[in-house]
Image: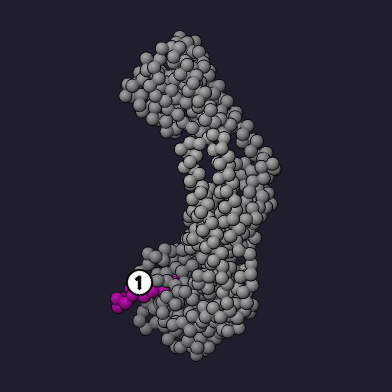
Amino acid sequence: MNAVIYARYSSDSQREESIEGQLRECREYAERNGMTVVGTYIDRALSAKTADRPEFQHMIKDSAKELFEVVLVWKLDRFSRDRYDSAHYKHILKKNGVKVVSAKEHISEGPEGIILEAMLEGYAEFYSAELSEKIHRGQKENALKGKNNGGGIPLGYLLDKKEKKLVVDPVTAPLVIEVFERYASGETVRSIVEDFNARGLRTRKGRAFNINSFGSLLKNRKYIGEYRYQDVVIAGGVPAIVPEDLFYRVQERMEKNRHAPAMSKAKEDYLLTTKLFCGKCERMMVGESGKSHMGVMHYYYKCGGAKRRQGCDKKAVRKDWIERVVVRLTMQRVMDEEKINRLIDAILVMQEQEDTTTPALRSQLAETESAISNLLKAIEQGMFTTSTKQRLEELEAQKEEILVNIQTAELQKPKLTREQMTAWFEQFRHGDPENRDFQKRLIDTFVNSVYVFDDKLVLTYNYQHGTQTISLEEIESALGSDLRCGSPAPHPHRRGCCWPVQIQAHEPVPPSGPPDNAHVQSADAPRPFHRQ
């Protein structure tokens, strides 16, 4: 009689030795009972509460090939801990001429055997449910004490194994703050990921960073000290790494980008996308286009609330008009020599701050060297195999890569001079306001938000201190009368409207910073309103 063995283990307390023990006892049972073992099916670290187990399903499928007549299991709970799953799959096996046999539970073929098997399966399901309840209760108690309940350790933290609590990692915590500050100041997740990988930084598992790595990182409330486990929420249950105001600025920007229209899909480039808001309802204004009865295409920004008829009656604003006003006013009001010198002073101070890349790389180097040392000790004790040789080569290559990255990081540390920074800012002072690339770069760097009211514009720059109001006459005098029309005119003889402009300013923080050799991080760039 041909038989196959099905073995399984699920919890962290069981290991590969558990599988070996199951196989050994099943083979001994087969030998005593004249069975020939023709194959094995093994599921590792998978619960029997579900039938969604790859090798289990493979075995059920193979039973139709008439290659074996018996499925040997160590105990019936290895097959299933759900009575309904057990009955269902035993029925399938029975139709294929296969029966399930327990090597440790002696179940007779008569009616009493049916009752015993049902009792064993019921007890297995009861044990599984009770164990789950105990584990959940224990984990909830841990949570109430702020103890870690397993899972991955977020970047920036270490696990205190004695206290079973998260503590701040002084090496990687500065990297977390850097990610939040750079994203809050306007950088994209992709550019931050590319920069980290170019610097040779790696995740806790030694892999390159990807967009998903930072997507979940930026939403993780542990960084503001909030401990969460199911319905347990403890403020201050974890040591905070990121200031709350910075964390919420990041959430605000992520939410705004989530609802932003896909600019890449638009034929016309709307430069103020994600920065232009309705002054009446504070919703984002989005790009729109349409043809007049003369066949002329018009481009404009429209309030999302008015577009979706959510109670706002704000009129649309002509695209060219608002973009040119913002560009011209930004050049005139932001790029003056006094503000540039103040910003350069701030950057010079920032350059003196401690580098975060090199300490992280040196930490990776220490971990790699420790792994190499442990492997060499194992080899000295006679554990030299093809696998250990391959792993040693991988670690040596990893060490060489980290050393190169450290040297590269140290070589790329030259600090920018005041003259270099001044030259970088000069490109904005003397750029061509009619050039689309220049307009986009200027807006992305300096404009925080623009609110459109019926009688004014409120521009919030990445500047601090002071508010200025500019009359319509001053706008016309400075920018020309060609900027008079504000909203799109559905009829050729209808005039648009114009507004006096109110400028709100906050400390300038270019999101991209001076190119290549320096990065500028925002201290704060608050929005003037809470938006829906």
Q: Amino acid at mark 1?
A: Gly
Examine the structure image and report whether residue 295 is included in the region drawn in magenta: yes
Taking the image as drawn, is residue 303 in sight?
Answer: no
- Residue range in magenta is 289-302
Q: Few, some or many C-alpha atoms within 10 Å of disc 1 (few <14, some 14-19, many ≥20)?
A: few
Q: Position of residue 408 (x, y in %)?
A: 52, 63
Q: To which quarter of the image does residue 54 belong?
A: top left
* Whether residue 171 is situated above or below residue 479 in the rendered picture: above
Q: Residue furthest left?
A: 295
Which residue: 37% across, 14% down? 1
Compared with residue 358, is residue 117 higher up or lower down, i.e. above or below? above
Instruction: Tally the marks.
Output: 1
Quarter residue 35 falls in? top left
Residue 517 or residue 339, whichever sits in front: 517
Look at the image and say whether residue 238 sits in the magenta stretch: no
Residue 65 x, y percent position in the rendering: 32, 24
Residue at 58%, 44% (x, y): give it: 373
- Describe the colour scheme in one phrase: one colour
Q: Position of residue 78 (x, y in %)?
A: 49, 25
Q: Residue at image x 57%, y 77%?
A: 417
Indicate the quadrant containing the C terminus: top left, top right, bottom left or bottom right. Answer: bottom right
Residue 434 in the image: x percent, y percent?
42, 81
Magenta residues, dominant SS class: strand
Q: Determine whether 339 is above or below 230 in the image.
A: below
- Per the image, label 1 sits on a secondary structure element best described as strand
- Is residue 128 visible from the viewing direction of this image? yes
Residue for badge 1:
290
Q: Residue at x 54, y 34 (%)?
A: 382
Closest to the observer, 168 or 127: 168
Observer-nearest of 511 and 259: 511
